[in-house]
Image (cartoon, rainbow, N blue to C red):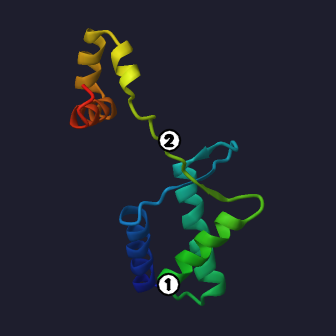
Amino acid sequence: MNSQQEQLFEEIMDQKISQEKFLYEGRDENGRWNLIAGLRNYRKYVRAYIDGFSGGRVSNSVFEIVLKEMLEASPRELRPIVVEEEPELTLEQYRSMPVRQIQLKYRSDPGFKAGVEKLIASGQI
């Protein structure tokens, strides 16, 4: 790639990572899944595709093609990062907690605070 193509590559890569929130992980050299390995591998394969199959032309579609292929590859090159949501706070859970624990957790845990506020808003506490 020439310097203009390199600049466009970096701009699109930054866009894919920051605005679209690259939520995939890949295997590192030890076989463990993590975000850094996913980014490194994605970057490597997009660059290889541009150099080998796209005649040096950089475009959004190249990034999309490579992402799709990496997600469908066998063995899998990328997988979505699964973000586990905390279960919703129930009235029974709230009532079973000591007052001091509720106070401390309310100050330090945004998810718990949101659960308490939801119980308050619904008139349950």
Which mark is nearer the camera, 2 or 1?
2
* Residue at 55% over, 81% down: 62
Left or right of 16 in this view: 53 = right
Choose between 124 and 20: the one closer to the eye. 124
List the residue tagged with mark 2: 84
How far apart, in angstroms, are the residues tagged by discs 2 and 1?
35 Å
* Residue at 22% over, 37% down: 121
Q: In this view, does 92 lie above or below 82?
A: above
Could you say where residue 28 lies in the image, as x and y percent from the top left? 64, 48
Residue 123: quadrant of the picture: top left
Left or right of 119 in this view: 70 = right
Choose between 114 and 49: the one closer to the eye. 114
Q: In this view, does 76 lie above or below 63?
A: above
Q: In this view, does 99 lie above or below 55?
A: above
List the residue tagged with mark 1: 58
* Residue at 26% over, 10% down: 100
Image marks 2 and 1: residues in contact by CB distance under 8 Å: no
Query: In the rendered structure, which amino acid carries the disc numbered 1?
Result: Val
Left or right of 33 in this view: 89 = left
Query: In the rendered structure, which amino acid carries the disc numbered 2?
Result: Glu
Mark 2 nearby-residue class (10 Å; few <14, some 14–19, many ≥20): few
Could you say where residue 89 lies in the image, as x and y percent from the top left? 38, 30
Q: Quadrant of the C terminus?
A: top left
Could you say where residue 114 lies in the image, as x and y percent from the top left? 28, 36
Judged from the image, the secondary structure of the residue bearing numbered disc 2 is: loop
